[in-house]
Amino acid sequence: MFSINSFFKKNVDGAMILLLFFVVSLAILFYYLQNVNTNIKNNDQYMNGVVKLQNYNQAIDNTLMRSYRYLDNDQIAETTKQFDIELLALQENEIHVAFSSEVAALLKQISTLYEIKTDVIERFKTLNARIISAVYYLYELEISLRQKDIENGQVQKLLGDILYKIGQVFMGRDLDELHLEQDLVSLNLHRSGDEVLDYFYGHSKQVLKDIRALNSLLKQNKTLALDDTIDSLSVLLEYESRRNKQAEGMIGQAFFIFALIILIVLVYTYLKVLRNRAEVFYLAYHDTLTKLPNRAEFERYINERVNEKHKGKKNFIVLFIDLDRFKIINDTLGHDIGDEMLVVLADRISNILGKGNLLARIGGDEFVSIIENKKDIDSIDILVNKIASIIREPIQIREYSLNTSASIGIAKYPDDGQTKSMLLKHADSAMYHAKDNGGDTYAFYTEQLSIKIHRRLELEQELVHALKKQEFILHYQPQYHLSTAKITGAEALIRWNSPVLGNVSPVEFIPVAEDTGLIVELGYFVFRSACQEYMKWKDQGLELNLIAINISSVQLRQADAFENFKSIIDETGIEAKNIEIELTERYIMEYATGKLTILDDLRSLGCRISIDDFGTGYSSMSYLKSLSIDTIKIDKSFISEITTNEHDAQVAKTIIVLSQSLGYEVIAEGVETLEQENVLRSYNCDMAQGYYFAKPMDSESFIHIYHEKQIL
Amino acid sequence: MLQKSSFVLLLFVSVLSSVIFAAELVPLPTSLKVDAKKVQLGKKLFLDPILSKDKKFSCMTCHNLLHNGADNSAYTKGIDEKKGHFNVPTVYNAVYNFRQFWDGRAKNLKEQALNPIINPVEMGNSMPVVLRDLKKNKEYSALFEALYDDGITEDNLAEVLAEFEKALITPNSPFDRYLNGDINALNKYEIEGYRLFKTKGCISCHNGINIGANLYNKFGIYKDADSEELGRYNTTHREEDKYVFKVPSLRNVALTAPYMHDGRAKTLEDAVNIMTKYQLGRPMKKDDLLHIVEFLNTLTGELPEIVKDIDVQHQ
């Protein structure tokens, strides 16, 4: 899980940074565009200012075209003032900096030209006013002179000519300067002190002078060409503005592309993350080897099923499938073979289960299935059998043909548990039960299982400390000669009085001890105690042939078992020949086919060996032969119905005959009635052990019984 | 030939008449839009001798707001009895002058405002001193701070003075009322005077809303005026600009004697006489002249509200 977290972290972090970049560049772009927008507005405003200048200048030029006409001086003053204000505004406007120095230079030039122009305008106004006023008077004078009856018609004509020429100018025609001058010279000659003529002459001269001045003024204005300069400015501004816009546009675009690239990278990264996440998710919830859902996924799945909130929760069945002795194959043939096996098996089981049922691998050789298919639920045993048989089928891997089997535990929901943990625990118990039964089988969960397992756990817990707490004692059951009823020996039987659990039967706790390995320590305790007790009895004058001690095969598999036994024998001082070791039939076979030598060693010490519960396990004559034993103990199952069951009687009889013919002694277990005794006696059985004679008892009681029976 | 020339003449005359008669005078508006706070501050400063070097002269000293916005002498009289070179022009309606000063060197009221303060023959002060004195005054400091972020500066000082002067207009003269439709505002002689004002050609220079003050002209066109002052020549240094001055406004002219830039005309009659001889270059019948003078008397307007609370003692 850790790697998944850090994987995410790395990608998410990168994505975060990119996102930040994106947002930041977007913000910058936005701000920049805002700026550009303002710039454009300002630019346009600025250029509008220049347009205004053009308009004002145009108005002024229009005025200058109105020579010899009435001028609205107030209006002209206003227009010139506006031009001034606008020009100043343009020069002082901050947006100046966005434009080149050429613009500033042009503005300065305009300013200079304009100063000259205003001067021109003023002089124009002055001259115009003078001319108009004077000419009007000339006209008046001409009329009054005409009325005055001047003898000199020539003078009259002269006046008329002069007025005419001036009138032409008023009509917009060019001034006939040369001739007007000539006329004036003539008039001067003919003035002859006439006051009115004097006035006429004076004013005409002034008018001529003023008209000349006006004309040159207009020419001067033309050369000023202020309108051209303003136009140049306008053009330049447009050019620069456009160039600025282009530059800004490019920068804007660059930013945009940059942001776009980041966005694309972001999206790509995100998609990659999504894809990776999907992959990781898959990995998180699936077993890499078999591709089946893994434990995490199983847990999730089953949680979902159990916690489903809708009505009519569906029933389902949980199967725990545990492969038997898979570890051995792994250890002996190697993990690759083992893995390939698992893949094949996973495949097989999947196929059997079909789509509606989940199969998950939750452990090395553990699978679990959730059966939800109704048909399968109804015929679960058939399904489970199918699974078991498909697993049983040989698996061909490389040159090996491998066989395995499975223990399958079955728990039903909601019958066998309404919570996930309960359900799984019970399926597990069922599976263990199947395993306990030897594997290659299946088992349903029962209530008993729980109790059994619970009990088992209890025992385990108590056993651990029981020995230390001296909760064990030995009881002894006499073995007696059938014909003489003399006590020949005693079987040591362990008893456990647990303060917590009460009396726990060895039938219960011995297997547990064997499973947990506690049997070893317990076994030595029993062995030692029994030997010690025998010596104690010996001191007390009891003469017994032997003391029979059950030893667990688990114990005998210990490497140092012989040394330990020997040292106890030495320690206690008992003679080896007085010890009879009781072993199970099964163990004999195991021993015979194995490499261990412990029994031979013990035998060579002098110990006797007896086979317990004979007839119930694997019996093979060759095995019996290979290991010289001393006693055969007929299992009580043959004795209990010896009087009623012919078959049992025959078997018992056969065992006795066979054993004796081989030179073994025979002892019958579980003799409980006189009739049984009688039958056995008739069969010539050597010895017996059973409730009829005496129950297992503690040492004191045994001594007492011994003495009692000896008297008889 | 004669036919043609007389036809042309006729045309010419009609054009001319239309041109001349196109000139009409226009009345003053009754008020102008101004910034009230600046006006008040400007007024306070206008009346305050703090601006002058000897702390005895205020703007009011030469520009009597309770009378004609000018004084009654031919030349300005400054601090330490210093004599100036020009007849004080009226501050009334000065907002309508196309330029300020007799030679038109100031473009507007604001450009003109500080000049008298630093003119050695007028208030004889210096701007640093003025600013310092103003800044020392708590009331002025507060008033300026309230209006301007940068407080007391030359520019702001000029601005408030100009704003005050903007408010100094004198509407509702009898002539204005006549122009506005009150035909009874003028008597028949005054009306005749107005007609003569136009036909004699006075209107060719004295026109527009301020009845003059919108162009320059040479003083002494048909007769040499013997002026000491050179007028525009001082700035342009052109021969033709010698003795060229700003044509003054004729509003309230009845109150602003003496007349001309050097105050040479003591009465309106004298003034009109000089004008006729020097500027129009034509004879004028006595009656006509008197009518014109009567007309000129109708150009006196009403003092604005803002000056009506000024203490008469304040001189």
Image: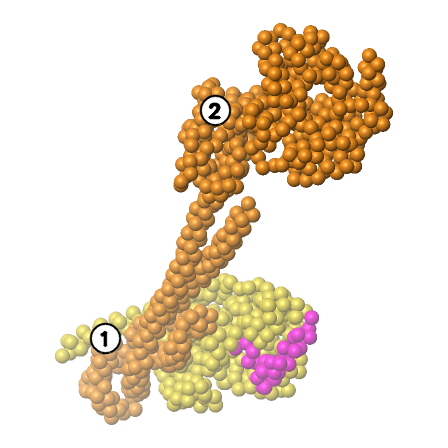
Q: Residue at x 44, y 90 (%)?
A: B226
- Residue situated in front as seen by the camera: A379 or A394: A394
- Residue situated in front as seen by the camera: A671 or A292: A671
Residue A363: x and y in percent read: 54, 37
Mark 1 is on which residue type?
Met
Q: Residue at x 75, y 38 (%)?
A: A567
Q: Residues within 10 Å of mark 1 (few under 14, many from 20)?
A: some
Q: Which chain is yellow?
A: B
Q: Tell which subunit mark 1 falls on.
A: A
Report, in whole angstroms, how far the alpha carbon at label 1 lies from the one at label 2: 128 Å
The part of the chain drawn in magenta is B112-138
Which quadrant of the view contains residue B151?
bottom right
- Of badges 1 and 2, the one in the foreground is 2
To which residue does mark 1 refer?
A171
Q: Residue at x 37, y 75 (%)?
A: B204
Marker disc for residue A384: 2
Residue A443: x and y in percent read: 54, 23
Q: Is residue A383 above or below residue B268?
A: above
Q: Is residue A666 above or below residue B190?
A: above
Shade of chain A as shown in the rendered figure? orange
- Residue B123 is one of the magenta-drawn residues: yes
Check disc 2 and report its element: helix, strand or loop: helix
Residue B46: x and y in percent read: 60, 73
Q: On the picture, is A453 further left or further right than A576?
A: left
Both marks 1 and 2 on one chain: yes
